[in-house]
Amino acid sequence: MITIALRLLIWCLLSADLGATNVAIGLAVALALPQARRSRHLPIRQLLRLLLASLVAIPVAYGEAVRLLLMGQRLEGRLEPSPLTARGSALLTFLEVFRITLTPLTIALGVEPGGQAYRVHRMARPLPPGSGAGTTPDSREVR
């Protein structure tokens, strides 16, 4: 039931239409998509936390888009770790990666070898000379 509701929510967010016809089509699509063969217990608290983080990322994405328009040429790429908090559920993993990649200045590149964090490419202002950019594995400069 939660999976169908989340699929319908994603449908409505993607189509940006809450009309009765669109909701009916979204519900039909949510029901037609294949279901998991075995049901897995979803930790509701973690699911709500990741949903809230994804919703908070939407206004952040608009702010970053404006910043990208204004400072696009003066930004540089860095690799940064982002702690991996969703474990055991494909839905939770999807929501976490969605939150990272929703903003225009970040993208998830994969999981660190230890499996404890995502490798995230983040566009940011250049660090001042001598600040130690690129000397730590947590903040490597990418060009």
Image (cartoon, helix red, strand yellow):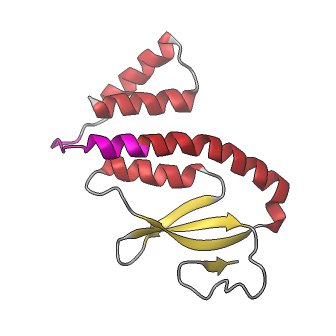
* Residue at the (84%, 54%) spot, across then down: 70
The magenta segment is 36-50
At which x and y percent is residue 132? 67, 86
Residue 21 falls left or right of residue 102: left
At which x and y percent is residue 91? 34, 46
Out of 48 and 143, give the one closest to the viewer.
48
At which x and y percent is residue 14? 54, 33
Q: Is residue 24 above or below residue 2?
A: above
Outermost residue to the left: 38
* Image quarter in which the C terminus is found: bottom right
* Residue at the (52%, 55%) spot, across then down: 100
Residue 72 falls left or right of residue 98: right
- Location of residue 47 (image quadrant): top left
Out of 113 and 37, give the one closest to the viewer.
113
- Count how many numbered circles sit on residues in the image: 0
* Residue at the (53%, 83%) spot, across then down: 137
Q: Is residue 21 above or below residue 86?
A: above
